[in-house]
Amino acid sequence: MKKYLFLILSGLALNSVQAQEITSGLRFAQDNTTGTARYRAMSGAFGALGGDLSSLNSNPAGSAVFINNQLGFSLSNSDTNNKSNYFGNRTSEKDSSFDLNQAGAVFVFNNHNPNNNWTKIALALNYERTNNFNNSVFSAGTNLNNSVGDYFLSYANANLSRGQAGIPLGTITDFDYYQLNYADQQAFLGYEGYLINPEEYNDDNTKYTSNVPAGGNYYHENTITAEGYNGKLSFNAATAYKDKLYLGLTLNSHFTDFRQNTYFYEVNDNANDNIVDLLDTSFENEIYTYGSGFSFQLGLIGKLNEQVRLGLSYQSPTWNKLNDELRQNLVSTIQDYTENDNPPITFTNIDSNNTVIYQTYKLRTPGKITGSFAYVFDKKGLISFDYGYKDYGNIKYSIEQDSRNELINSDISNALKGVSEIRIGGEYKIERLSLRAGYHYEDSPYKDKKTVGNLNSYSTGIGYNFGGTRADISYAYAKRNSQQGFFSQGFTDGAKINSINNTVSLSLLFEL
């Protein structure tokens, strides 16, 4: 007889996000090149230029470069193609999204007093969607060695190298799921789902073995679907001294809304002498993260002469307060030889209608420093260069009454590193028409350079000035490879992913 076991579970404490610690911190620490079409067309190389609403991302002194008041907004369409290779089997998945990714205004107040060297003050308000999380990845293939059962087994047997003993069987069998911490919850799932067995059936047992049949093939499918965004609302003030030195300050209010569903499916055809055979397993995890944050930026731009400009800016860490919700769903199909053949029985162990939201936690993402150079050719063309540095190893979690803070942050500093970033942009004007192009390179944030690879991006665009109105359009191509395990421990095999993103942006700007 076949018996179908369903476990549908809701609830989480932040200390439960074992699989998300490094990847989550990195996800919310990285910013894409977003903003106006002009900014994107030149790959964001605006640190020494200013004069664009999105240039405030590079250097807050840039608003003082504006001559007139300006209002603008930008629309973008982004297409992502993820090609997966899992043990030689190739699949692909595409995702497309359209959004209003930028809107803002700058107001310039000129000082007409000839005896005052501070020639102007500029105030700006700008919204940008700094990260678009809409993405889909599908991987499938046959693994000859490892099973998802190893994931649950690693939690049940714990990590002796860190001084953690195995989880007592009594903890798994005598407590409700919601009373357990994350590691115990995973062991609970593995045990109730017939993926792991205790070596001894007594409450003090702390050693477990896998119930997944060995010695054959495991067919795997892994589907990841994500949606949401990071947004930023910036309040900026800048001033100009003799129109040669520009100083600026920006205060940023950040907000996060992210949801990701991961569905893993395993089928095995391996022989098994157990009384209960495990035929297939599906394991679903859905995480929802939301919250807010704060950061600030300081910057200056120096005009050495009419051709040469230098810029320097500092972006502070972002101090986030976030909340997580997690839903886990484990379904195991088993063959039970202890009963006669009867119709399949379906039963639900735990009601899935309750969602538990646990305490707010803090996530500090690293700051960034950027140096910039620009050369202007007789006001008809320019070339700009930005170099930035950000240390992702400085990502820090802070969770009240959680002894694993130091352990989590140690894992991050051991896995991630400082990253150099290069942006190059150029623009050439033919009367009212502007031609633009850019290049953006960023190192891998991982020390192994494989989990997430280097970023290479190329961009181009055009703009036309109608007088009091300007229209810009840009196209950007970005490519990055990655190889992340489907799970954080125990079963860490994963697919090689080749990600290509194509983005078209349109901006309309109006002088006021």
Image: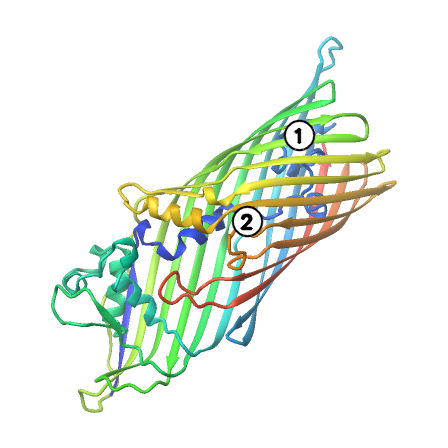
Image height check: is 19 above or below 283?
above
For mark 1, give the secondary structure.
helix
Q: Which residue is mark 1?
A: 63
Label 2 crowd bin: few (<14), some (14–19), many (20+), radius 10 Å = many
Of labels 1 and 2, earlier in sequence is: 1
Q: Label 1 is placed on what type of residue?
A: Ser
For mark 2, give the secondary structure.
strand
Measuring from the top left, give residue 437's x and y in whole percent.
Answer: 76, 48
Measuring from the top left, give residue 268's x and y in whole percent.
Answer: 37, 82
Measuring from the top left, give residue 181's x and y in whole percent.
Answer: 25, 54
Residue 373 or residue 58, whichever sits in front:
373
Q: Which residue is mark 2?
A: 131
Disc marking residue 28: none
Hey, which quadrant is residue 454 in on the image? bottom right
**Residue under the point 32% across and 71% down:** 149
Q: Is residue 396 visible?
A: yes
C-alpha distance separating marks 1 and 2: 23 Å
Left or right of 82 on screen, residue 385: right
